[in-house]
Each structure stands twice: as structure tokens, then as C-alpha cells.
Amino acid sequence: MSLYDQFGREIPPREVKRPDTRDLAVATIRDRWSDYPSSGLTPQKLAAIFKEADGGDVRRQAELFEEMEEKDAHLSSQFQIRKLAVQGLEYEITPWAEDAQAKKIADFCDEVISDLVDWDDHILDFLDALPKGYSMHEILWDVSASENRIRGLRWVHPKKVTFYNSLTPRVLTEDDNLNGIDPPPFKFAYHRYKARSGYDTRAGILRVCGWMYLFKNYDVKDWIAFAEVYGMPLRVGRYETGASPEDKKALINAIRSLGSDAAGIISKSTEIEFVEAQKYGSINVYEGLARWCDEQMSKAILGQTLTSEASGQNGSGSRALGEVHNEVRSDLVKADCKALAKTVRQQILRPLVGFNFGWDTPAPGFRFLYEESEDLKALAEVYGKLWAIGFDVSQEHIAERFQVPIRKDGETPLSRQPQAGAPTDPGRTAQAAKRIAKDPANRAGEDDGQDAIDDLADRLAAGGSELDPMLQPVVELVTKASSYGEILEGLYGLYGDMDPERFQQLLHRASFAADLWGTLRARKEAGE
């Protein structure tokens, strides 16, 4: 039997007999320290950080990405939207087969995962791969004589992972803080966000947002400086020739005090003039650039902007566009769910099953329930139309589609309640309504208007025999035709020979009678 890890490397059989119970990626006090690479960030510094990451040293890039999420509220909110869209979903573990052993294994895995009280937090930590490109967890095993369980998962900070002289991640430990150690088999779960082809160090979304973050920082810094002096008058102090240094010092102190305290003391030989500030700049320039940078970052994170901002590029949004853009975001959620489910199944459930039931035993399935709720009303109409035309649909399929169980023997059937206003006698026809209308004794509770309309329809149908010459060729065509297309072709040929004059006369008479009856009834109700 050949066994491979998550990086496609073959694992020797002797290394997979028992789980590794050592604590390797232990967090220390020093891990909280940071070089704060975002402080004084320049294009040259940002390019240098990215080049270091390309060479395998991702420490400064990981620290920069962490600061970017902390400092930029827009970035933080967008990633929260995408992460919580997956974290808030339910999941299910399904047996690999229908036999009892497969169901037992699925129940065992479900029990182990349910016992992890911080499972939702672990999902959020796995999704840290979205901004940074990768996320690693150390699996903490609990080994006993009867079974091997996972007692917890420990998140490994991205800066404690290195790719130095390696194409696969290595873990920096206390014993080797330079080159790191190769992750032991089934000791670490490594989730990669594969938005595009390339190396893990360049896969994070924040790698795309880095330059927009830099430009926005420059813009906001200038915006704050501009807002500080925007509209404020310029204070100019004039001193006479021969003024002493003490007078000059007193003058400058007075000018500075006017900026904060609006008060100062100067001698009579000096003068302060307030020059109205010229509004050469526009605050819209700074706001527009900041908004544009936010929109570019929203596109990188959510694939669109209308579900993250109240308006589009020109300040106006569209509900239809918003719905389309929301579908794009839904596609991202599905992709995130599938990628994370694959990581959980292959790197958590697979070793859990292998160490307990043997490596030849397949792992159960794992998936997030991300399907959107269906419009059951519209779906019921579709099935109703299919049933009406004779489409053969099983009760079992309908029960499964609508999640409604079929009634079992001995259970009370659901009685059909008549709709409001519907006749309770299913045998009532137009002729029956006509007889009721003629007998006042049987008219209690009936609608006179409906009776009159039924009687009018019966009278119109009585003259239908006069339409037989016109309809007879159609009846013969339908009787002899062998297909629907043949009927259509025949109708086109018959249409030119038909005489609809008699049919038009009947319609005119019916319209006139209905109008006359309505007018008389309205006058009667008005007491005329």
C-alpha cells in the first residue's frame, strides 16, 4: 500500500503506525513581537518585503498582512464577510458506502469533530488562508490503547512557516528557528487558498491588495493634513526693523497660541495679520482616490463592489446588478466551501480513519451545506404542471424534493379543506346553477350575479350548433392528424376557408346582454 501526504510525497509505512503526539509548534511570548513593517511603508519597502517572500522568507510579509487587516477597516470588513459566509454554515459527514461499517466510521468521525468545542474558531483560522495564501494547524493527538482521537487543533501563525530552500512549507520551532522542520506525516493540516496557479507565498489576496493599501495610506495621510488647514486663515506676524530676538520669539509664540488657544500677548510694535486661506485643493480628490482603492480591494476579495458598497462607481447602484454581483459572491462561497471541505477530509478525517480503522479504509465524505434555499412555491407550480400533462412522478421523489415525509400506515391522513368561496358540491354545473336561479326557494346563500352569468353562458352555448359548420373541419383535422406539427400545418390551411361571422355575432350578443344586465342591476341597487 502506498500512502501520500498533502504535498504528494510518499510516506514510509513505518511512519504511520501511530500518531505523533509531540507538541512542535508551541507558541511563545516572542511570537507576539512584531517588526511592524507597515510603519513608514514605501513602494521600495513593499517591493522588498514581497521579494523576501518570493525567496521563501515570509516573516515580514505575514506581519504586514496582519497589520493590513488591523489598520484598514474596509479590508477587515470585506474579509469578515467572506469568512463568516463559510463559518456560519452547517456541515455534514456522510458514509463512504451504505454498509454498517461505513456508517459506523462516519458516526465516529462526526463524534470526534463535535467534541472539538472550538471547531467554529478552527474554521475561521483555516480561512485565514484567504488573505495570506495559506493556513496551518497542528493536530493534537490523544492516543490510548483502544483508539486514537484528535483532542484539539492549534493554529500556527503564518510567520512561523517558512519556504526557505523548500517548495513545501516548513515549521519554525524552538530547536530550529532558521530552516524549520519538515512537517511529520498527519501532524499538521495545511490549507492553501488556490485562487490562481503559482507558489503559496504569492497566493494570498492581500498580495493583490498590497499596492492599493499603500496608495490609500498615502492618500489618507495627505487628506488628514489637508483637512487640518482647509478653510483656516493664515496667520502672518510682522515685526518692525530692529526688533530684538525676544520680540521675535514673543511674536511667534503668540501666532502659535492663536492656532490652538486663540489668545496671545504681543507688544504694540508688532502686528498680526489673518490672511484668508485659498481653497486650491478639493476634498473630493482625496475621497475619490480612497474610494477607488476600496473598490479595487473589494473586487479582489468579493469579486464585485455592489454588495459591499451602497453605490457603484458613479454613486448610483442597481438592484439587478446587485443581484448579479451577489451571485458572483455566492460562487466564491461555494469555492471556499469545497476547498476547505477537501482539506478537512484529506488531512483530518483521513488520518483519523487510518489510525483507527486501517489505511485501506476510505474516509467518509465531508461537505458544507452551502446550497441556497429554493423557491418551493415556484417549484410546486412546475411539478403541478408536469403532473397535469400526465408526467409520471413518484411520491418518493416529491417527498425527497420538498423534504416532506410520506404518510406511514396507521398515521392520520391530512384532510383537504375547501378553499374560501369555492362550491362545496363538486357536481354543480352550469345547468344546476340555472335550475337554482329559476327556483327562489333554492336560492338561499347563492350569488344572484353568478347565477345570471351562468344562465347567460348556457344560453350562449345553446346557439353553439350554428358554429358546427365552421368547427367541423377542425375536428376532422385533429381526429386524422398523427402529430402536433401536422395539426398546426393543417390549421394554417383551414384558416383562410373559415367564416367567423356567425361566431362574431354570438360574441356581440353576449357582450350586449352582459352590459345590459350589469346596467339594470346597478340601477336596481341604486333604487332607481
Image (tube, rainbow, N blue to C red):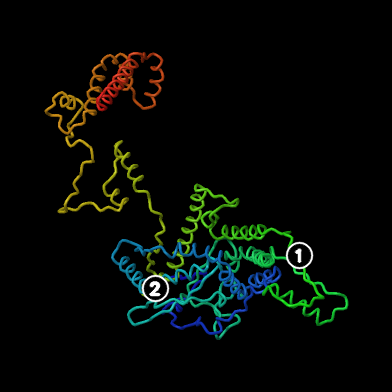
Report the residue at 47% width, 59% height from top.
333
Indicate the quadrant containing the N terminus: top left, top right, bottom left or bottom right: bottom left
| Residue hosting label 1 | 275
Where is residue 71 drawn, in percent x and y? 58, 70
Question: Quick check: can you spot residue 214?
Answer: no
**Crowd class of label 2 (few under 14; some 14 to 19; many from 20; radius 10 Å):** many
- Helix, strand or loop for disc 2: helix
**Alpha carbon separation for disc pair 2 and 1:** 77 Å
Indicate the quadrant containing the C terminus: top left, top right, bottom left or bottom right: top left
The mark closer to the camera, 2 or 1, is: 1
Question: Quick check: can you spot residue 503?
Answer: yes
| Residue hosting label 2 | 352
Q: Nearer the viewer, residue 380 or 70?
A: 70
CB under 8 Å between discs 2 and 1? no
Q: First in sequence: mark 2 or mark 1? A: 1
**Crowd class of label 1 (few under 14; some 14 to 19; many from 20; radius 10 Å):** few
